[in-house]
Image (cartoon, rainbow, N blue to C red):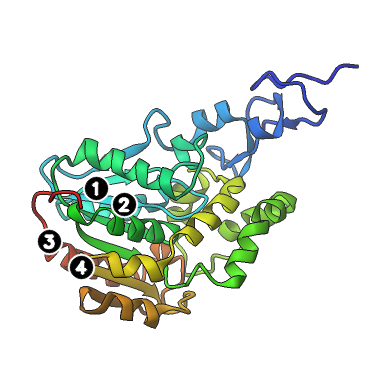
Amino acid sequence: MAPEACPGCKKTAGRKRWECAACSGRFCRDCCKRYLLPEGGTKQVRHCNACFLKGVNWDASRTYDVYGPADGRPVLMIHGAIIGRMAMVHEARAMAEQGYRVLLVDLPGHGARFAEKLDLPSALAALEEVADKEAPGQKLLVAGFSMGGYAAAAYAAAHPERVAGAILSGCAHDTTTLFWTAVGRFADVVYAACSYKTKSGFITGTFGPYIDKDMVHESLLRAGAEYDQWGPCWRLMKACNMKALLPRVRCPVLFVVGASDLKTHEAAFLKLLGPRATHLVIKDGLHTWPYQPAVLPQYRAAANEFAKAAEWGPAGAKA
């Protein structure tokens, strides 16, 4: 018997097929590997690409969203690993309420850019594309969380002429260590072997009572996950060698860590930034502080004061 053709890509290689929880079609792994919490559902389940894009709580026809007034100072906001732009939607709304025009982007391999290859050049190109379109000729503030913090540092180092300030959050660990290199090298194989329960555990199993369930529902579970991007995400962070990047960041920096987050190189990175850096330790903050309502006022107050004092103005000449 000939192998069953995948209705997504039409390929017939291999016999194993995965069922989409929404349409019940049977697809190859590449066409049916994305997880989403359906409307009214209780857990994330596997969707084919078409049903995933129909079911998410973000506009799949665009790769970024804009929040805030048209004349607001521009903020380029960058999400972390595995979840796309909706992961930071609450902070985007908070800054928009302060009068900023927030550009909430999807990095390659995530959200509406899920089919694009993720690496450092493609991430920087995606950020520059949005900046050129939405803030031409202007300096902007770049704000990134977790993997997005590393990407924000790389963008600030690559484009000093157009960055008014950088908020780097949850990125106080050196990603060039031997351990990080070894894990990144085998991340694809190890992660592919993990069960759904293991893969989803970082969302549903590691968040304690301090985490707001409604925020997680909107930002993570209903937004959908890109679990197979863990390997590329790991390697992107490794490519963002902070020891090399931070000395090239010329703008003011708000360097943010949760008090209970991984921050093995916090002091070293602050030393590299020198007087350009303002240091914020979020009391009682975990790595997942964006979903801890009790600690958010600390971050939002500091971010607002930092943004007010950023080096706004027209973009300079590219070096």
| For the residues bearing labels 4 and 3, Cβ distance under 8 angstroms | yes
Q: Secondary structure at mark 3?
A: loop
Crowd rating for badge 2 (residues with CA inside 10 Å; few <14, some 14–19, many 20+): many
Q: Secondary structure at mark 1?
A: strand
Q: Which residue is mark 3?
A: 311
Crowd rating for badge 3 (residues with CA inside 10 Å; few <14, some 14–19, many 20+): some
Q: Nearer the viewer, residue 254 or 244?
A: 244
Residue at point 29%, 43% (across, down): 128
Badge 4 amino acid: Pro
Q: Looking at the image, tell me whether mark 4 or mark 3 is earlier in sequence order.
A: 4
Badge 2 amino acid: Met
Crowd rating for badge 1 (residues with CA inside 10 Å; few <14, some 14–19, many 20+): many
| For the residues bearing labels 2 and 1, Cβ distance under 8 angstroms | yes
Q: Looking at the image, tell me whether mark 3 or mark 2 is earlier in sequence order.
A: 2
Badge 1 amino acid: Val
Residue at point 42%, 46% (across, down): 121
Q: Is residue 241 above or below residue 99?
A: below
Work out whether residue 65 can be spotted.
yes
Q: Is residue 120 above or below residue 176?
A: above
Q: Which residue is mark 4?
A: 252
Residue 292, given in percent of the width and then of the height, sits at 41, 66
Q: Is residue 185 above or below residue 18?
A: below
Residue 98, given in percent of the width and then of the height, sits at 16, 55
Instruction: Between label 1 and label 3, give the one nearer the viewer.
Output: 3
Q: Secondary structure at mark 2?
A: strand
Q: Which residue is mark 2?
A: 77
- Tag shown at residue 102: 1
Residue at point 21%, 38% (across, down): 134
Q: Looking at the image, tell me whether mark 4 or mark 1 is earlier in sequence order.
A: 1
Q: Is residue 125 above or below residue 275?
A: above
